[in-house]
Amino acid sequence: MNNGFLPFSFPEIGQEEIDEVVDSLKRGWITTGPKAKQFEQDFASYLGNKVQAITVNSATAGLHLALEAVGIGPGDEVIVPTYTFTSTAEVVRYLGADPVFVDCCKNSLNMDPVALEAAITNKTKAVIPVHFAGLACDMDKIIAIARENNLKIIEDAAHALPTIYNGKLIGTLDTDVTVFSFYANKTMTTAEGGMLVSKDPNIIARAKIMRLHGISRDAFDRYQSQTPAWFYEVVEPGFKYNMPDIAAAIGIHQLKRLDSFQRTREKMANIYNDVFKKLPLILPEKAAENSQHAWHLYPIRLDDSVSISRDDFIIEMSKKNIGCSVHFIPLHKHPVWRDRYNLKPSSFPVAEQAYQNIISIPLYTAMTHNDQLRVIDAIKEILL
């Protein structure tokens, strides 16, 4: 068995992706163009249910565009979970609004609907639920609360492809916008990039304009025209958030393999579940009936009976040449949010407790069965 370093994550890139990128390079259209359009169309078709999709250069960009498109601005409040990456909150500040942080559910570590409802004020205009690790939030409750209070719902689905909730793919629920990530460690990748999806044509139209400098006409349409089409107007001070064709070329073929990727991840997660249920660990919550976990992450939590600390556990795994990570350091612990909003750990007891004991262990499709056995044996040696 190979005892070389086993990374926490590693992308699986096939020859089809490589050939498609080379084709872009040879054709000369390397920025946003025909492959980005194809990727958008393929992605919308994959989700179905009359969803429209636009590529962006990151999920963070997509979240920013989404909030801007639904009208978030200075003085508004947007409710976000503390148990997420900082991008979920920072995009709220981009628009001069304020993120309001809430705690998570004990088992799923997803946004707690009770905490959400308690945090709503007359300034609250939107909520951003995050589907942690690939398991859907309790969206029926979140949607009901949001609609009762006239809040926009922006789903942060960076972990949630292809997650299914009550028979529907995340991205097709009764929400306003969903944003996916294709970062290198996600369930599919474009190296960097993301996708904004919505059923609302007005949101899509606004996001398209703001995605590229607030220009009234798509650059690809202008540059591929057979007749003079140089004229355009800048209608808003927009952003530079477009995805280049080189990245979309990867995504076109990753998307074709997505369901296969999910089956592999689920198989590996089930192996972990079966072995680790005998160890002093709290395991990830499974998807409910008629739902599907994307298994972007496999986070374990050390039981209180374990004598080793989380930090020392990671050090011991490193000594065995196995990479681990921590998802997440809750936002209320970071100076930028803690100090600006005077956040106290006592306001987020579930997130605080989870953070003390949580470790994300390797789970990715490029792992071999022997790789997974290495992880299992290493954890057994540390805990037993």
Image: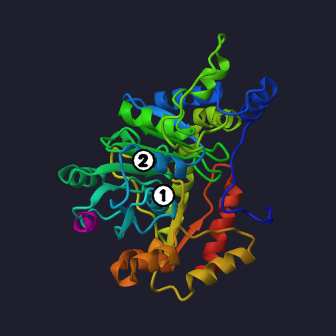
User: What's the residue at 39%, 60% (across, down)?
Assistant: 97
Residue 8 found in image quarter: bottom right
Residue 75 shown left or right of residue 24 in the figure: left
Does the magenta portion include 85? no
Which is more toward the observer, 55 or 372?
55
Above or below, 297 against 332 in this view is: above
Residue occupying the far left of the picture:
148
What numbered label is drawn on residue 94?
1
Where residue 189 appears, as percent x and y from the top left, is 63, 44
Which quarter of the rendered picture does the N terminus lie within?
Answer: bottom right
> Looking at the image, is 349 positioned above or below residue 300?
below
Q: What amino acid is found at the position of numbered circle 2 in the picture?
A: Glu
Secondary element at image label 1:
helix
Amino acid at pointer 1 = Tyr
Horizontal side of 42 relative to 151 (left or right) equals right
222, above or below 130, in the image? above
Label 1 CA crowd tier, 10 Å (few <14, some 14–19, many 20+):
some
User: Which span is picked out in magenta?
Assistant: 115-120
Q: Which residue is mark 2?
A: 68
Answer with the quarter of the image where residue 122 lies.
bottom left
Mark 2 residue element = helix
Q: Residue furthest top?
A: 227
Residue in the foreground of this view, choosing between 73 and 64 = 73
